[in-house]
Image (cartoon, helix red, strand yellow):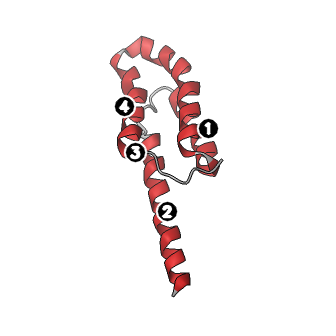
Amino acid sequence: MDKKYTPALWVCILMDLIGCASYAIPVLGEVGDVVWAPISAFIFYRMFGGPLGAFGSFFNFIEELFPGTDFIPTFTLAWILKRVMASRRAMSFSRKAL
């Protein structure tokens, strides 16, 4: 399932902030990450789909499970990557049209 749209940047930032929320509660936060990791991975795949969604959801799952890695803005980085890939595709398409 390859999505043809890019999710809104603010949604990606919000998802990253939710992932970082475990830092607010030092001990309970890491336990919460065990619950949040599969939920976050599922949301990631549904938002991005395709190869980016599959790889990113796996990376997001691992990132949420390991202590101290919640600061990585996985959703926002995927948003940037998706935009860069889309602009390169558009440039490639416009060059072929010439």
Reading the image, the residue beneath label 2 is: 86
- The Cα atoms of the two marked residues, 4 and 3, are separated by 15 Å
Q: Which mark is residue 8?
A: 3
Q: Secondary structure at mark 4?
A: helix
- Residue depicted at 49% across the width and 70% down the height: 90
In the rendered view, tell whether residue 38 sits above or below residue 60.
above
Q: Secondary structure at mark 2?
A: helix
Q: Which mark is residue 17?
A: 4
Residue 94, percent from left and from top: 49, 79
Q: Which mark is residue 58?
A: 1
Q: Secondary structure at mark 3?
A: loop
Tell me which label, 2 or 3, sits earlier in the chain. 3
- The Cα atoms of the two marked residues, 4 and 2, are separated by 25 Å
- The Cα atoms of the two marked residues, 4 and 1, are separated by 19 Å
Say what amino acid the circle numbered 2 marks: Ala
Tell me which label, 4 or 3, sits earlier in the chain. 3
Residue 73, percent from left and from top: 42, 40
Say what amino acid the circle numbered 3 marks: Ala
Q: Which mark is residue 10?
A: none
- The Cα atoms of the two marked residues, 2 and 3, are separated by 14 Å
> Marks 2 and 1: in contact by CB < 8 Å?
no
